[in-house]
Image (cartoon, rainbow, N blue to C red):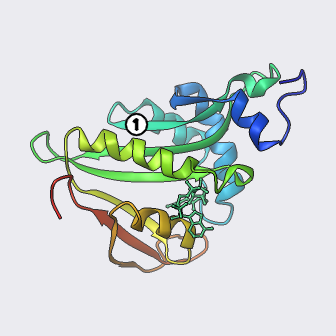
Amino acid sequence: MTAAGPGANPDQLLAAATFGRLAQGAASGCAALEAQIFAGDDPWPESAFASELANPGNLYLGWVIPDGGAAEGVDRVLAYGGITRLGPESAPEYEIHTIAVDPVLRGRGLGRELLEALLAAADAAPGPVYLEVRTDNEPAIGMYSAHGFETMGVRKRYYRQSGADAYTMCRPAAGES
Ligand SMILES: CC(C)(COP(=O)(O)OP(=O)(O)OC[C@H]1O[C@@H](n2cnc3c(N)ncnc32)[C@H](O)[C@@H]1OP(=O)(O)O)[C@@H](O)C(=O)NCCC(=O)NCCS
């Protein structure tokens, strides 16, 4: 890492990052990555991430470069994923909010690692896991299908800004099929 930060080299970025539960300070870095990736599809602003990160029923994990690697005062988020727990203690259900990986770091297993860590958390108190994904998002649908998610139906014009449709996908509770 240099005074100017780790640059855009994927190996340097990952070497400078730590993986773990995201703290409140990651809200602005999550929003920055979200705006880059989901422009045109109602990207969550920093205030939405701040609220979700503060919710004790949520688990957000990710790779973060503290201070952006250059004492910028803002954590740089390279990838994040979040899951929320719903329903009563006796019959929990889960919803994956999203998983997002910086474009320069895709295809290296980060998305899979995030998803598996979120699912492991859900499997500690097993329940079905739901999510919505754009019907044209082949990489994400491929990743979810490979982890036991099946398409339940289509939500027309789910993404208000673009008007794109979404699949609702569900992974049965661990131990069920
Ligand atoms: C979806 C996303 C998170 C995957 O992250 P990633 O780190 O590139 O994925 P990984 O390298 O861990 O690959 C995991 C699996 O995803 C699928 N996948 C990844 N890239 C793919 C591609 N270009 N085409 C098809 N499937 C792909 C594969 O099933 C892959 O498993 P495999 O390597 O065993 O074949 C990433 O593409 C992303 O951030 N996309 C934009 C944000 C987004 O759409 N998030 C989902 C919202 S619901």
- Label 1 packing within 10 angstroms: few (<14), some (14-19), many (20+): many
Residue 123 position by quadrant: top left
Mark 1 beta carbon near ligand 1 (under 8 Å): no
Q: Position of residue 107 (x, y in %)?
A: 64, 57
Give the answer, above or below, for where 101 lies relative to 16. below
Quarter of the picture for ligand 1? bottom right
**In which quadrant of the rendered image does the N terminus lie?**
top right
Residue 132 position by quadrant: bottom left
Q: Residue at x 49, y 36 (%)?
A: 61
**Residue marked by disc 1:** 59
Q: Residue at x 14, y 39 (%)?
A: 89
Q: How many marks?
A: 1
Q: Nearer the viewer, residue 134 or 64?
A: 64
Q: Nearer the viewer, residue 72 or 54?
A: 72
Q: In the visual, does 87 lie left or right of 120?
A: left
Q: Position of residue 83 (x, y in %)?
A: 39, 45
Dot 1: element: strand
The three-letter code of the residue at mark 1 reads Leu
Q: Position of residue 141 (x, y in %)?
A: 48, 69
Q: Position of residue 98 (x, y in %)?
A: 49, 53
**In which quadrant of the rendered image does the C terminus lie?**
bottom left
- Residue found at the far left of this picture: 90
Q: Residue at x 52, y 70 (%)?
A: 159
Q: Residue at x 64, y 43 (%)?
A: 31
Q: In the visual, does 152 lie left or right of 51?
A: left
